Every structure is written in C-alpha cells, then in structure tokens.
Image (cartoon, coloured by chain):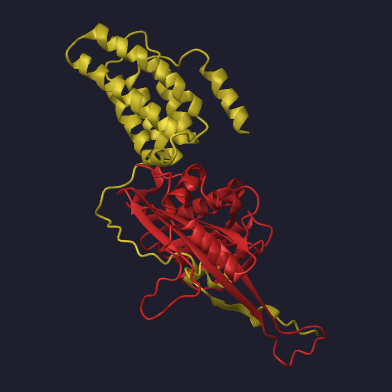
Amino acid sequence: MPPIPFSSFRRAQLIFEMRYSEAYELWDRTGSLWKSVEKDFTKLKSNQVGPNEQAFIADNRFVLTAGLQRCNFTDHRPTGSPEKTIEKVAGFANKVLNSLNVTVLERVGFRSVFSVSCESLEELREKSMIAVHALPLGAPFFGVRPTSFGAAVKIEADDGDFGYAAQLYPQEKGFEFNPPPDILIKDLERREEKTFELMLDVDFSTKKPLRTDAFDCKSWLLSWNRAIGRDADNFLEYLTGNHGRRD
Amino acid sequence: MADVIDLGKFAGMARTASGTDAVNVQASEETGSWTRSTNISGSAGFLSAAAVRKLDDESPIGKMLELVERILKRLEICMEHLNQQEMFSSDDELMACKRLLSELLMFREVNDSVGLIAWTAYQASQVEAITDAPALPEVLHRVLTRLWSSPFMRFDEACLLVEEIEGAVPVAPASGFIEVSEELLTEQT
C-alpha cells in the first residue's frame, strides 16, 4: 500500500475531450445541437458563444464546449459516482457526433484529477515528499540552499494505441474577492483564501485516429475509469520507488 | 428597476503555485484542460473498437468483440474445409458457430445494430446442413468482420448487412423468431 493511498484522494475534476477535423456542420446546426443538449440538464446557460466555438455551463457544475475541431465536457464538481457523469458525457458526445456528422475522431481524451486537502503549505510539502521518491531535503543547487521544497513528478507513456500522462504535484491556490468601492453593501469585504492540495492528475488519450462507428463513449470512459481504480494504488506505490512496479 | 451586479466578476484566482491550471474556475476552460500537444497523424492506422480490451477486458463490449473473434476464426476454418470439399468437417465448424452465435445474442443490448446482426446471424446458422447454404460462412464472415471493426454502426447500415445474410440463406425464418422478436421489442419499449 502506498504511503498516501488512492482512497485518501477525492475526485476533483473530470474532463473529456474529442478532437476531429473541421466539422463545418457546426455553422448550420449549432442551435439544434444545444437545444437537444439542453434537455439533459436542469439549467443550461451560455458562457462564451461564437461561430466557431460555443461554451455552456450546465447545472452550475458542468462546462460543455462544442467547436469546429473539438468538443469538451468538464465536471467541476464530480461528487458521487463517476458513472453518472460518464452517462452525461456520453449523451453530450453522441449528440455532438451526430449533429456535426463526425466520422473520424483524431483524438479522444479522458482526464481525471484527484486531490488530497492539506491544512498548511508545510503539510502539503511534507505529503508531496512522502508521495514522490524525492531527494533528501537541503541539497544546495543553483545557489539555493533550500529550507523547504515540494516534489512533483510527471510521467508520460504510450503503447502506440493509448497513452497516459500522470502527474502528482502539490498545488497552492489563492482565491481573492475584491469588490470595487462603488458597491456599498454592508458586510461585503475583501476576502482572500488559500487552499493546499496534493494533486493526482491522470490524463488518458488515444494515440491513433478512430472511426466513430467503432467508438462508444460510455464503454471507453467506464473502461478508463475502471483502469484508474484498478491501478492507482500500484502507480502511487511505484512513485515512491519502493514497490508495485508493473512489468 | 433594480440593477443586478455580478459579484463573480470581482472574484478570481489570485495565483496558482504549481502545475497545471486544470482546476481553474469554469470560465477558463480554454486554458485549463488540455495543455499537452499531440502528434496524431491522420495517415496512421485507425484504432479498432477492440482496443478498449487493452484498458478493461471485463467490459461488455470487450467480451462481445472477443466472442466475435472466436466466431470469425471458426468461420475461417469452416470456409477452408468448404473450399476443399470437406463437407462433414465444414458442417462441424458451422455447428460450433451456432453455439457461439447463440452466445452473441447475449450481447444484443450493446446496441440495436449488434442485436439485429446477432439475431439474424444466429437465425441463419440454423440451416440443416452446410450444403443448404454454402455461401453462408463467407457472408457471415464478412458481416461479422464489419461488426467487429464497427460495432456502433448506424442501424440502416446494419439493415443492409442483414439483407446480405438473408440472401445467403434460402430457408424460412427459424421457428420462434416472431415470438422472440416481439419480446425484444417489448423490452425496448
């Protein structure tokens, strides 16, 4: 078992993307496409709309984009079972493929981001050091004698058909809210918050083009999702440099 | 008339310390998600549906494609015997195919095209002897190869393939066809 097991990570984001060559039908069928997509969500609101690409926010959670050369589906709050999100993704993907008459996909990608929350920057750095086989603290390079440092790793691999890019890295995020002085509302004050998270980011993709009549979005995404559940702990252990090396 | 102020405009990400911006706020989808460049050449070979078995050999589609491969191998042997006028051996292989085709029916819910082709292929394989339909192995091989490479074909394409199978079998539909097809239709509704 790795020092930070996969079960301690929570799913933070789920992203699906299909790339195809120019789908000119987008210019003719955008309205009907989004009208049909709207039926699958409680609320669909346009975000950035242009002739070559449209982005919509659905149910204050999903971002859907359809463009001339690609479409995306992002779940920013992937709580609950991923199967439900995958159902939504598959519904959207099928509608895009049918509406735009896409016959060949140049690339299909499925990216899952997981995170472990930390209380402080120190805890985050400590966790990243544990999770990644890192060098002893304090080795001076480039004129810097560190008093603290964080470790990150990125691995890219492919077998000619499929590939993945897996990353483990510490992430510090700052959020700030700066209302302008002309908004005079009581209790509305400037706010700034920070979050510290250890991120595990697994980005699967196809490495060859694929005919759409050989592609079933739901089956593929479920398979990728199961692959994560099956191998994530082994992968995390592999990063520590100790065990779990897979031939 | 009240003014609505979108406070979201004044909120944002102050900084991201490391790595990707993939977890950024919703509006920045363009920069957030897919930063890695790819070099996929359109001239390269296509991925087949069977590639999904590399990811997960327990998926229904993976199991179905594995079964289709087994049927195709049997059909190839059957055709070889047929070419050499070894009718008994050829018939034995067709008998073996019948059992596998009945297994293929279990995957009819993968999609309508799979269901239609699986049912028609199973029905066609119920001929008394290979000599009644000598063209059947070749037609089945062609149709199932198409099913293997493109299981998510459009339904009208599947109908054309089914017509090919029906053209190779000069016999009446197997008994029970109407009852089973009605049951399938009831399930779908």
Number of numbered discs on residues:
0
Q: Quadrant of residue A177?
A: bottom right
Indicate the quadrant where residue B166 lies.
top left
Which of A204 and B73 lies nearest the eye of the viewer?
A204
Q: Is B9 positioned to the left or the right of B58 in the image? A: right
Asked whether residue A131 appears in the rendered view, the answer is yes
Q: Residue furthest bottom?
A: A182
Position in image of residue B93 (x %, y %): 31, 14
Could you say which is closer to the camera, residue A231 or residue A205?
Answer: A231
Colour yellow maps to chain: B
Q: Position of residue A210 (x, y in %)?
A: 35, 49
Residue under the point 58% across and 24% down:
B182
Residue A31 appears in the picture as rendered: no
Q: Nearer the viewer, residue B130 or B55?
A: B55
Residue B96's place in the image compared with A203, above or below, is above
Q: Is residue A129 above or below residue B171?
A: below
Quadrant of the image containing the N terminus of chain B: bottom right
In the image, residue B73 above or below residue B17: above
Q: Is residue A183 left or right of residue A245?
A: right
Q: Farthest left residue?
A: B84
- Percent coordinates x, y for residue A241 in the rendering: 41, 52
Q: Residue at position x 35%, y 53% from top?
A: A157
Query: Which residue is rendered at x = 60% and y = 52% of the image?
Result: A8
- Give left or right: position of B116 versus A107: right
Q: Estimate the x, y position of residue A97 in percent, counting from the top left.
A: 46, 53
Tell me the quarter of the picture where residue A55 sits: bottom right
- Toward the top, the furthest residue is B88
Quarter of the rendering occupied by the C terminus of chain B: top right
Q: Colour of chain A?
A: red
